[in-house]
Amino acid sequence: MKKGYWIAGILALGFVALGLTAFQKTLTPYLTFDEARKSRGVVQVMGALDKSSDRYDTANQELSFQLLDEHGRSMPVAYRGIRPGNFKDAISIVAIGRYKNGRIEAEKLLVKCPSKYQGAEVEKSYSAAAPATGS
Amino acid sequence: MSSHYFWPGVAAIWGALFAGIASAAVYLRADRGRADLLPLARSFYAAFATCIVAASAVLMTLVLQHRFDVSYVNAYSSRDLPLHFLVSSFWGGQEGSFLLWCFWGALIGLVVWRSAKELEAPVMIVYLASFLGIVAILCKQSPFKLLPPPAPEDGVGLNPLLQDPWMVIHPPVMFSGFASLSVPFAFAIAALWKKRWDGWITRAIPWALFTFVTLGTAILMGGYWAYKTLGWGGYWGWDPVENTSLVPWLATAALVHGMFLQRARKRHRRVNLLLACFAYVTILYGTFLTRSGILADFSVHSFIDLGITGWLVAILLGFLVLSLALVAWRWREIPVEADEETPALSRAVLFVLGIASFCALAFVILLGTSAPLLTRLSGNPSQVQNSFYGRTTTPAAALIAVLAGLVAFVSWKGDSWRGVLASSRRSLIVGAVGVGLAFLLGANQPASLFLLFLALFAADMNLRAVLRKAGNGKLAGAGGYLAHVGFGIMLAGIVVSGVYAKSTRLTLPVGKPVSVGGNTLTFLRVLPATATEKQAMEVRVKTAAGKSFYAYPKMYLNSKTNQLMANPAIRRTAAADLYLAPQSYDPGQPEQVGRDLRMTKATTQNIDGIGFTFRDFNADRSAMMRGEKTILVLTDVTITPSDGVNRDATLRYVWNMETRQADAPEMEIPGVPGGKMRVLAVSPSDGAVVLRLTGVSKDPKAEFQAATVESLSLDVTRKPLISLVWGGFYVLMAGAVLALVKRSREARRAVLAAERPAGAAARGEPVPAPTGPVVPAHGRSSLDPTR
């Protein structure tokens, strides 16, 4: 029976090693706009939505907008997909994607909204009883 | 304390806390030689359960009575919710879901104390401890807090995404699974405490299986809800919320297998004690991750911090340290069997490998989910891409499929490779035929074909084992095999529907057929919302086979939150789902001549060298007071043409409140020959006016906008064999339920068997550990080495 444990141990170790390498490879750091411009891989940037910059290009099915960081500097973002429902009310938006052609080409957007469903207390964001949602 | 509370609810929660503590304390005393105190301890437990049920009843009543002066009720419900959503707003927030968790815990405990027998005191102490932390959180973060008066007329309402029947039952099922996992944990700790190494397994197996079934069902419901509601195209997004319910489920799967192994072989005791603790701690860890606000910048669900993070960390670390310390302390005392020579290919080895695979799988998913927490230590919080999960879980899934397949035809004693190969032959052929068929149908990715092969192999091997059992008239004992059949089917569905889904983004101009992948889609019209139905888009789909049907993807504005919601339309067939996810809708506009100029008060804008200054509105408010149907708004502007001379002008705008139409005559722009202007819209609230100008520019193109056609953009996805994901899951769950029934019977028999000597326990006399399996498991119960 020792054999079983040995095989299991070796397999588990190999698997943990695989997990750790994959972990390092797929980590997407939060970067400032300047850092994002220099980066190659997938990154995430966070900023406030510049409300006047938001455009939807129907022909290309592409949403484009500018994010503003706390210093008021901007970063253009393009996203192919539906405009998230609560987009306009966002207090901040996280864009996850690559920096390409002078803009972040986002694969995923996370939209943070002011508390709408919460009581009047200290809540920072929405949807507490978080259901299983996809990206 | 400045805030006030609804006292009956608060009293019930505090009552539960004190009754729970009292029960644990009296149990402790009973354990220290005062067995006569057991009835008192039970009474305190009954009081604890009564208080929790009462607190839940109070909160439910407050919700149903629309008591919006209660902060929690105000935050999660509203008058317009139908009854079932009203009920579900009970667990719409953190406090309510904690209470729901305790509610199940309180009820399950009533059964546990009856079955724990000689371990009653230690089991109940640990079991109570596992809930008292949450009850303490509910004392601090009460759902019964009152808002300062006056009470709001209506509540804020339930998150519209949660207004779905699946989301009504998802949380109760999920929390019943969480609560029942406290039972194996309590038994494991009690076993360590009392050095009763084997008796606990029989009685804890049904609860581990119960968690496996309920948690699994809840996960599936969540995935199905995401698939049919959210419209991003999948059922699983590796979001932290999903992961933190998947990991305990995998840990429970490992535990269930470990328990069967110990039950059959009377060994691997250390592994099971660790697994029971691990499974329970993953729930605590998940609760901490998702409810502490620590992942707020990383999840679509942006969790909020209620200020209970410290409590959650304390509970988590408390139980983690307790279990690890206890296992370490007892480590050398836990009996280990002298090694009997087992061939590498035996059922026991397969079980151990399977358990290791489940644990490894749980570990990497935990690792990925914890990325923001781990990287925070180095200063730059990051998360992993979803590809991390694909890379790491695929090899584990493949290994599990191999093991699950082999286990059907490998005995505990062990078999020769040749013999196993011979008994696997048919299933290998089935797998190969399936892969060949998939290849002919266009599947060509080697990795996915390999996984598909293993999945079919596992399903067929186990299907034959089920039939073999049924042939012997022992179908009731085929639960494990049946579960493996389901796993294989499900894996095949996951692989095929995930790898070979074909998605196209289409824009459908109204009334114009567009073809994609053999289907012809025509966007017909927008169906306005009715009392019961949301606004939907009517799309006619004509399939390659010439069949025609209508699909109704939905797109609507949530009136309360102004969120744009989009629900996909799904056409299900056995072979594939056609998934129509609306992306955008353009109502279209006629061609337009002129330029629109939006101006705010006291600002000047320049158009082709002409300055426009908006000075003020003059609205005839008294007309409104008098109840007239029309209201006149005069807009004063100053025009500064290229000659630099200011000219004042006043534009008229008459709003008819009945017809909701405006009458705004066009007038010449003074000083600009050929130029015309009129008021298009006024917005008194933000002091803005929109003018439409024509003839201002020399270039007529600048003033012309072509008409756009009404159109709907859709993501059209064909998801082959996704029905196998759900179908396989049903089979998996059916197998688990079958096992649950069988093991519950066994547990009841074991309890009855312990009944006679249990009389001695009540008198404080030592009792032998209850005899292990009553039904010989694979004819090996005589091999019990503990005696």
Image: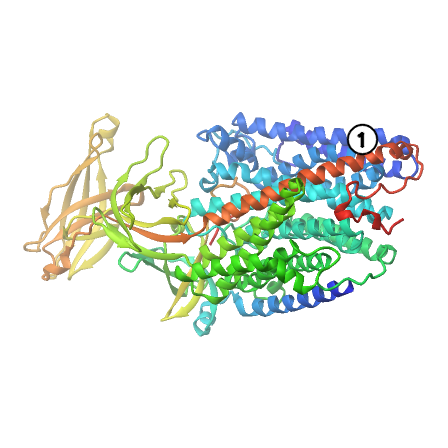
Taking depth in this image into account, of A85 and B770 the one nearest to the observer is B770
Which residue does the image show at 45% across and 55% down from the upper left? B497
Among the 4 quarters of the image, the one containing residue B115? top right
Residue at the farthest left position: B673
Residue under pointer 1: B42
In this picture, is B148 found above or below A17? above
Horizontal and vertical percent position of residue B259? 73, 49
Taking depth in this image into account, of B665 and A28 the one nearest to the observer is A28
Horizontal and vertical percent position of residue A27? 54, 66
Q: Is residue B504 left or right of residue B660?
A: right
Instruction: Tell me the quadrant of the picture where the N terminus of chain B can be found.
Output: top right
Callout 1 environment at 10 Å: few (<14), some (14 to 19), or many (20+)? many
Q: Is residue B496 left or right of residue B118?
A: left
Asked whether residue B432 is in view, the answer is yes
Q: Say which chain tag 1 marks.
A: B
Among the 4 quarters of the image, the one containing residue B417? bottom right
Q: Amino acid at mark 1?
A: Arg
